[in-house]
Amino acid sequence: MRPHTPTRIRGGRTTVLAALLSLALAAPIAAQAQDAPPAERTAATRDGVQRAELPHQYEVKGPATPAARTALAATGVSIDETHAHAVVITADRAQATAVRRLGYGLRRLPDPPGASAPPSGTRVKDFPAGYAKYHTYEEATQQIDALVAKYPDLLSKQTIGTSHEGRDILALKLSKNVTKDEAEPEVLFTAHQHAREHLTVEMALYLLDEFTSAYGSDDRITKMLDSREIWIVPDLNPDGGAYDIASGAFRSWRKNRQPAPDSQEVGTDLNRNWDFKWGCCDGSSDDPADETYRGPSAASAPEVQVVSKFVHSRIIGGKQQIKAAIDFHTYSELVLWPFGFTYDETGPGMTQDDHDTFATIGKKMAASNGYTPEQSSELYVTDGAIDDWLWGDQKVFAYTFEMYPSSAGSGGFYPKDTVIPKETSRNREAVLQLLETADCPYRAIGKEAQYCDGS
Ligand code: 0X9
Ligand code: CA
Ligand code: ZN
């Protein structure tokens, strides 16, 4: 998409320079500089310590239509918020230049917390102050293991594969008689494709906690666990999540941590890597430096392969058992449905009834949590997103939720941990609604007899 610009500061050489420089200054700093990932662009900061150059958020005034936003996204930035006549993007220096070349003015927004954090290379592996209640990958795993031990008849854990760096990717099953594969409609909840969207892991943990602890006392939850099989993949991108917090200052990292072939760059945007209309429609980037890099081929990311294979494993007797899904993201408070690769509401693979069912259920869920419902391409075109794959390839009624907050001013990707209880339980009703409709989604448009008769 965007040609590499000469202004881009390449990582390799500057890192070596930095290491030499700090060797001359002080031994401890040299050790830190060597710890910095080699592929990363670096920049000097006020204290003179060499740090990875982090992307920033900018407000961009002007783009007001899906087409204008799609053209803006083609520079390789991520679009984090859309408003009637403006957007908020995340961009590195080269991408910000590319956006200015389109004729837009950029206003830089405040960086996420951590300015006073330890220098890069220090391994803190935990969230900073104000974020302690967020779960690191290790803490989430511990909490999950404790729940499995406490509720062995309701909750079971499988490792469905590993991430690029070798972390386990988990699938939790919640159901009465959990150890048996019963003929019940299945529903899938996934979280954390994008590294910086940590609230989504808390969403998954909330669901695990809520569904186990309320079983037997809450009628709706009891009924759902008695008649559904619920799958939760709480962390699709554990490597990216760990990297985002590892320095003590949030890095605003989005992608996974897999090096791109023949490149110094690291990371594929998992939500552009799914094997349906991959790279078809200007809804992703072929430049490994970009936020929305789609990877060298469809499903090239191990994390995408692992979850794709898991979803395929739920085809039994030729029938996909998973009927509905939500993939949790942050932020903007949206309920989105397919397709993202086209502006069209209907077309090949999406009948009027399919669309109406998506929209009816989506609007009802949005009425329950106060989010805004829309087809995902209303934002901007995306290709290779998970919901397009789940519907286009597997006929799963798959939604994307963009959680709290609605804007950068309320914390953007990094809201304080005090919001976790409210903003996860806010989706309880929507999740229950989707579970309750999963035996026959077309009932939402009054066509149960036509689509769900008997089977
Ligand atoms: O761009 C994305 O992947 C999602 N936004 S985020 O800020 N979390 O990165 C939106 C995806 C919308 N498209 C589809 N759901 N298909
Ligand atoms: Ca069961
Ligand atoms: Zn996201």
Image: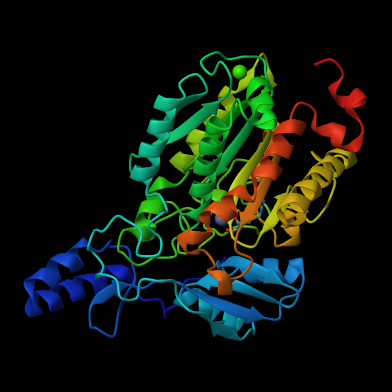
Q: Pick whichever, 232 or 34, lies toward us.
A: 232
Q: Residue at x 76, y 60 (%)?
A: 378
Q: Is residue 259 visible?
A: no
Residue 99 in the image: state x and y as whole percent: 58, 78
Residue 425 in the image: state x and y as whole percent: 60, 48
Q: Residue at x 42, y 81 (%)?
A: 7
Q: How is the image coloured?
A: rainbow
Residue 144 relative to residue 78: left or right:
left
Residue 239 in the image: state x and y as whole percent: 38, 48
Q: Residue at x 63, y 21 (%)?
A: 315
Q: Is residue 227 above or below residue 89?
A: above
User: For residue 392, which quarter of the picture?
Assistant: top right
- Quadrant for the N terminus in the image: bottom right
Q: Is residue 51 above or below residue 173?
A: below
Residue 169 in the image: state x and y as whole percent: 43, 36
Q: Residue at x 41, y 46 (%)?
A: 238
Q: Please count the marks in the image.
A: 0
Residue 154 relative to residue 406: left or right:
left
Q: Residue furthest front?
A: 217
Q: Pick whichever, 164 or 314, lies toward us.
A: 314
Residue 283 relative to residue 196: left or right:
right
Q: Pick whichever, 392 or 158, lies toward us.
A: 158
Q: Is residue 453 above or below residue 60?
A: above
User: For residue 373, which quarter of the picture?
Assistant: bottom right
The quadrant of the rendered image in which ligand 3 is seen is bottom right
Q: Is residue 380 visible?
A: yes
- Quadrant for the C terminus in the image: top right
